[in-house]
Amino acid sequence: MDSIGKIAVIIPQISSNTETGFLDAIHTKASKYGYDTIIISGVINYVDQHLDLSYSKGQINIYDLILHGDFDGFIFEANSFCSSRLRNNITELLRRRDIPCVAVNYEQPYFPVVSADEEIQLYLSAMHLIKQHGCRKLYCIGGNKDDIPSEKRISGFRKAMAESALPYDEKDIFYGNYWRQVPHQIALDIAEGRLEKPDGIVCGSDIMAVELVRTLNENGVRVPEDVKVTGCDGNVISQNERVTVTTVAGQERRNGTLAINKLIELMGNTVTDEDTPPELVIGESCGCGDNGGLRRSRCLSDIHEYSGTVFSILEQRKTNSHGEMIRRMSECKNIYDVIGTFIGCCYMISTGIKAELCLCDDWYRDLDDPSVYRRGGLPDNMILAIEACYEGGEKMVNFKTKDIFPSLSKPHSPRLTMITSLHYKGQIFGYVGFTYKKAVHIILDEFYTNWCDAAASGLNTVQNKMYKDYVNNRIESLSEFAPVLGIYNKRGLINKLMTMIAENSNTHLSLTLISYIKEERVHYSVPPINSIVNAIRISDDKAVLASIGDGIIAFAASDEDNSSTENMLTENIAEWVKNSYKGSVEIKQERIAAVSCSVSQADIFSIESLISGAEDKLKGQIISLSSGIFCYKDRFNSLRDDIFRHPEKEWNIEMLTRSMGLSKSHFHRIYKELFDSSCKDDIINSRLNKAKWLLENTSLSAAQISEECGYSNYSHFIRQFTSRTGLSPSAYRKTNGQKSK
């Protein structure tokens, strides 16, 4: 089913399995009705006093997309916002849109409100302690006093006690603000005798339950032998403790179901409600574990899946660091460098399947007045800088902000996409979008935040470089020479070439643009471009040299040898540098990017456009090289060796790309550039080479050889062998002769 619209979910953070459960319920139902789920998040759940900080303003600027995006409906997870001021601001933005909106756990007069039954949670956990474990004296630690959801949870505890005809005192009910301090003190009071030891304690959150269990055990009160404890919410922390906590899970998933059902109804659809009540997840803190009472459930499986995702990500991060991205971004010279680095580092967000970097159309500062830049909001028009980590992909595409991403305007199946802000020191650059297969894969942690900040710092670096170049160009525009290298500038090159052609109408020139991709962590005693310029001067005193941009030089010479290729030229340049510096300076041929074109009399008035066209091609080549080909060279060499050593393996391109953290398109591009062959062709060639050897040197049947070479289908082997060699296996064996007996 193709998507028919977009539903936005406004949420402050995604840092636990309860939040991904909420989103999963929404996305599952939204997909069924043909809607994309677009999550808009500030990543960090700010309190009121932090809202006016520069970084906070940059993060929460993403909520301005509420006004600009072409959405069909909104789900506002309002109660999760710590800042009442931000919650009110978002409410006002949603009111201005006048689009169907559902609020979760937040009473206000503008939108319908949904809220799953809070009472049932502590009712279930209290009844479990009473009925299953015979507890008679229970304490309850709730959330915030006078907070409606908190009071409803506590009323579930009161209901369980009343139905069981058990006496309790209101002093047995404590308010813990859903955090650690109060349960910690209660545990100490019990351990030190200031508070009577109960049979069990029912907690209104897993964080409180975990802290209670830890402190009781550390101070000599055994859980569950002396005191039994239950939590609430089904947070992943409950199942990752020395003593796992019995908890009630599924409440946020139920809130997500209620919210999406209500929104779809408001949008004119009929919805059949599928009730998913909270579940009791049995842990060890109540004593069930000692009796073999642990049991699996959907909610427990969800918790384990989230834990597995987190630990899988942590394992992958052992081999990379956002510090590496920060370093690479700090070396960016232009927007193309940023794009290349962005592509090359997408593998660090390993659970995403698509990444989109979108810039405001005014993302750069006013070069005439650097104090003028975007400090808030989003423009009506954006630039898709790059679409990566997916088959295909576009870059540098202008689009309307209301479309959110150009890819959403094309036919596609309903998708789940997270959008966060891109900003740096008070300047708004745009936003980043990551698409995921499942909500459980969304981990917005410090690593993710630092990764996005690194991308923004790269843009800031480029912006500063643009201003520096602008100032230098203004100065240089009065001259025809680049002062640092002592060669022509772009203006001087154009005038020189026009003069050469005008003086001799039969002149044919070869114009080559050259750049050098520096190696990481390599110190150059002489900047590579400087060494190339000096080497060309020494080796060809008739060559016309010019600097036409940062790190890019132009080399014009008589086009006498039309057979000369860019590859031959880069080989010559590497050799010239080596000879000119007597081996003390070395540059590598494979790191020289070069693009050539011819210039003749017909081009005399279009030389500038020829240079610009060649410059664009060169920048594209630089992006391709700098975005990963060298970073992955060793891994690709190892892979190719393995393919030819073990052609019989079941080689799966999708598994290979996933293992390298690359999109298919990126994988294929790097492979092709490194080996001038596709991975698929190499797999086929490796198998056919082995088949030829076996036909020549063994008496194995064609069917046996097919299996030995990794073919699961004998007919496919026959067709492929015949197509590639022009002979059937039997004819090949007859022609080449069996060499072994």
Image (cartoon, rainbow, N blue to C red):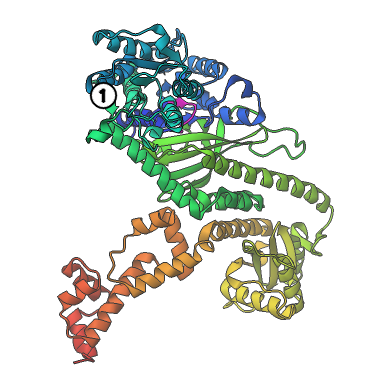
Q: Which residues are magenta?
A: 9-15
Query: Is 107 on the left or on the right of 337, as rendered?
Result: left
Residue 296 picture location, percent across and down: 24, 35
Quadrant in which residue 165 is drawn: top left
- Give above or below for 465 relative to 700: above
Q: Looking at numbered disc 1 in the image, what kind of residue is underneath it? A: Thr
Query: Is 493 on the left or on the right of 359, as rendered?
Result: right
Residue 654 picture location, percent across and down: 34, 55
Q: Determine which residue is flagged by label 1.
A: 276
Q: Residue at x 41, y 23 (%)?
A: 205
Q: Nearer the viewer, residue 75 or 405?
A: 75
Q: Residue at x 46, y 26 (%)?
A: 11
Within-10-Å neighbours for mark 1: few <14, some 14–19, many 20+:
few
Q: Nearer the viewer, residue 732 or 311?
A: 311
Tell whether position 13 is magenta: yes
Q: Residue at x 65, y 52 (%)?
A: 332
Quadrant in which residue 525 is drawn: bottom right
Dot 1 falls on a residue whose secondary structure is loop
